[in-house]
Amino acid sequence: MTDVERLFRTYNAALVRYLTRRLGDRDWAEEVAQETFVRALRQTSIQNERAWLFAVATNLVRDEARKDVRRRKHLALLAEQERESAVEPEETTLERAQEAAMARKAVDALAERDRLALLMREEGLDYNEIAEALELSPGSVGTTLSRARRRLVESYEALQKSREEREKNAAS
Amino acid sequence: MQHLDEGTIHSWLDGALNAEEAARVEAHVKECAQCQAAVAEARGFIAASSRILTALDNAPRGVIPAAVPKRRLDPIVWRIAASVLVVALGSVLVIRERGIGEKIYTTTESPDTVSASAPPVTVLSNQKPAAAPQSANAGSGKREAGSVGQKRSQTAAMGTSPTRVTAPLPPSVMGGNAGTRQDLNKAAAASQVAEQTPRRFEAATGRGSVVSSLDAMADEQPVRVVGRPRALGEKLTLYEVAPGDTVMLAEQVEMELQSVVVTGAGVSLQGATAAAAPEAKRAAKLAPTQDTQRSAQAPAPGPPAASVSFAQTPDGTATLTWRDSASGKVMRLSGHHTRAELEEIRRRIERARTAAADSVKKDR
């Protein structure tokens, strides 16, 4: 087994999950993960593999996103408006989808650094690895994560609450 | 001792503190009711945020048109397909030497008869660059692609190469046999050159086109889909045309109200593309002949200017807009390129899409 094969087998699942959570699109996530391993192939030596892979994947996403920020913002706004104005469908079949949508919204509301740190932590990266991948000081990772978790949960709960209220209004 | 700050509590719960710090935190938490509450809250946040993030794992697959196959199916199948095309190409332009330097040009009746039906085949090796964009675009792996080869192929396809003799696109690759007459014209043009330099020409033909075309195939870099940003009302595809160089293709999507409702749940535009996809398939099925004719004609000197508009923003982003003749959809291609480059990229993308659509049809 070559080194890249080993890297792939060891980290691909976590990396794809991280990117899927980050991007909201599994195909895209897999593409970025593949590109990340291709870059790894070109490296002669990598000191901390996991931190390196997550950092490169993060940068690949960022580089692409930077290219057309304004356009994306506009489209995101449009999508948001559509979502807001859309008629709520029956909950029974779509409950999970709605949870996913709220989760997406709550995650998107986080600051980029908080979001990435949290997603990396969820994939098992330790504080030093997160610090290395995101170029933070190791001492600040705890603060970053605590802030990210609190904000994520709070905004998710706020979304949940407003959904419940909407449903209550619709029922009465 | 001071109360613990939230960051320290999370670090402790995450096992990120060294033994000494951890012992200190633990001792404090035992005695401080306020910090115990804070620790309990932090545990709650950690568990809840994990649960919330898990909900993201049901992310939809990308918004992919039915015409685009999964990339991981590509390499081998496509390489075989490309080789077949190369052989077919080799049999199209055939020059047979007879008697005293008199040359007769023949074309095989159809590119589908892949066999080299004209036995003493000599092929213009000059066509190598012309063959490259077609065959390689059909899907040779991106990894082997060298930028030098790619540039060469691009130039050839754009018709600026000095070896342009046979450069105009051979019909075999474009999937039609509509160009027989044109081929004869091209061959006639080639003969003039060949007569001027008979020695060199003969030497060059000896090697045959298959090898050189295979070389070219490995050199050429196909456009590669690197992302599909989600957007409403249009389908966006990011193509990498060279390492680090990405262009964006925006394609109109007709959405139905039903799709919007489903999307209202916030997951994806799947409904919309699912609705658009069969339409594209239908169009492809209905008009395979028109398709091939169109592709046989369109790519050579560039599309008619009237149907294409070009705009450039001050920051250097250029956009090419046209209406796709098959689907009638408005397509926009943007990137940091000149108009000529964008048109070339457009042709590469269209070829890739045509090839992909063909392969999907074959699969079914």
Image (tube, coloured by chain):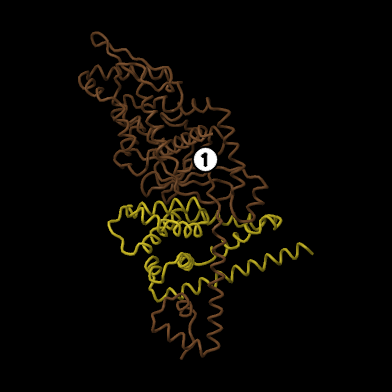
Chain colours: A yellow, B brown
**Residue drawn at 46 percent across, 80 percent down:** B8
Position in image of residue B112 (x %, y %) = 44, 23
Chain letter for mark 1? B
Q: Nearer the viewer, residue B185 or B172?
A: B172
Position in image of residue B311 (x %, y %) = 46, 43
Q: Nearer the viewer, residue A70 or B64?
A: B64
For this orientation, the residue located farthest to the front is A1
Q: Nearer the viewer, residue A64 or B114?
A: B114
**A46 versus B36 height, above or below:** above
Position in image of residue A104 (x %, y %) = 56, 61
Quarter holding residue B49: bottom right
- Which residue does the numbered mark 1 point to in the structure image? B331
Q: Is residue B287 left or right of residue A30?
A: right
Q: Is residue B34 left or right of residue A131?
A: right
For this orientation, the residue located farthest to the left is B199
Quadrant where the C terminus of chain A sits is: bottom right
Q: Nearer the viewer, residue B197 or B321?
A: B197
Q: Secondary structure at mark 1?
A: strand
- The three-letter amino acid code for the residue at tag 1 is Met
Total labels drawn: 1
For this orientation, the residue located farthest to the top is B99
Position in image of residue A116 (x %, y %) = 46, 65
**Residue drawn at 46 percent across, 76 percent down:** A143
Q: Is residue B162 left or right of residue A80?
A: left
Using a 10 Å C-alpha cutoff, classify the residue at mark 1 as few (fewer than 14 neighbours), some (14 to 19) or many (20 or more). many
**B71 versus B117 height, above or below:** below
